[in-house]
Amino acid sequence: MRKIEVTAKNVESATKKGLQMLGKELEEVGIVVIDKGSMIKNAKIEVVVFENDDERKEWENAQSNIQTKIEEEVTLEEEKESRELTEEEQEIYGFAADFFQGLADRLNVEAKIYATVLGDDLYIKLVGKDLGVLIGHHGDTLEATQILINSLIRNKFEHYKKRVFLDIEGYREKRRNALQELASKMAAKVIKYKRSLKLEPMNSYERRIIHYTLQNVEHISTHSEGVEPNRCLIISYVD
């Protein structure tokens, strides 16, 4: 069994480059993606050449075991991030659910309301049909509704000081993808001009997305400054 590492601007280019270097077709080799790359760093793959079918089977079994382990680790990480709601959070969820159910009825749309905890933040999630009216253009209505529900919660639950986050039809997932793209673009500027950049205020969950996206990028470090809810993430250049 022979292995080579190949880097290129993306996985597809690295694969083509590796096949050309080895004079092989795709079906004749095994491909392991080491790093998918980003706007500011190349992708890296490992190309494996097999001497016989037994080597291929052994390698495929090993890769299957690795994937299973990764999936288990992801599951454990998700479980670590989430937990059951406290009694107070249950009360807040019940209050919010009543509010959003009433709002959905007035708008004549169907919605199911759920609650979950990510990190230490309470998220209220709405799932249903025709909920775009509650998201609005670029999430404007979603953000306004989140401000409203937080105001109502603060008035009713005076001792609860944390913010409650609202997600509708997986919009936050799209936001995460946008934040990852933003992180790559801003880091590229930081590296180019060798100066720090301050991002807009974000909640702790969104700041973590930026941090994890950039944690292995050479010459980049991240830290947060300010006080909630105006705490910002700083992307800095390091030698």
Image: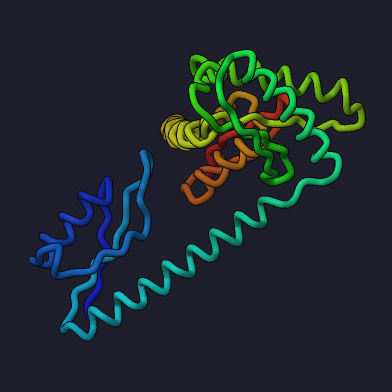
Q: Position of residue 61 (x, y in %)?
A: 34, 78
Whether residue 129 is visible here, answered yes or no, is yes
Whether residue 226 is visible here, answered yes or no, is no
Instruction: Give the side of residue 16 with respect to residue 220, left or right.
Output: left
Q: Position of residue 65 (x, y in %)?
A: 41, 74
In the rendered image of this protein, does residue 92 appear above or below residue 27?
A: above
In the rendered image of this protein, does residue 226 appear above or below residue 54?
A: above
Name the residue nearer the viewer: 146 or 208. 146
The answer to which image quadrant residue 141 occupies is top right
Could you tell me which residue is drawn at 64 percent across and 29 percent down?
166
Could you tell me which residue is drawn at 78 percent across and 33 percent down?
94
Could you tell me which residue is drawn at 71 percent across and 19 percent down?
147
The answer to which image quadrant residue 60 occupies is bottom left
Name the residue nearer the viewer: 108 or 67. 108
Q: How many numbered tags mark residues here? A: 0
Instruction: Give the side of residue 224 with respect to residue 180, left or right.
Output: right
Name the residue nearer the viewer: 120 or 39. 120
Name the residue nearer the viewer: 163 or 211. 163
Q: Residue reaching furthest left?
A: 23
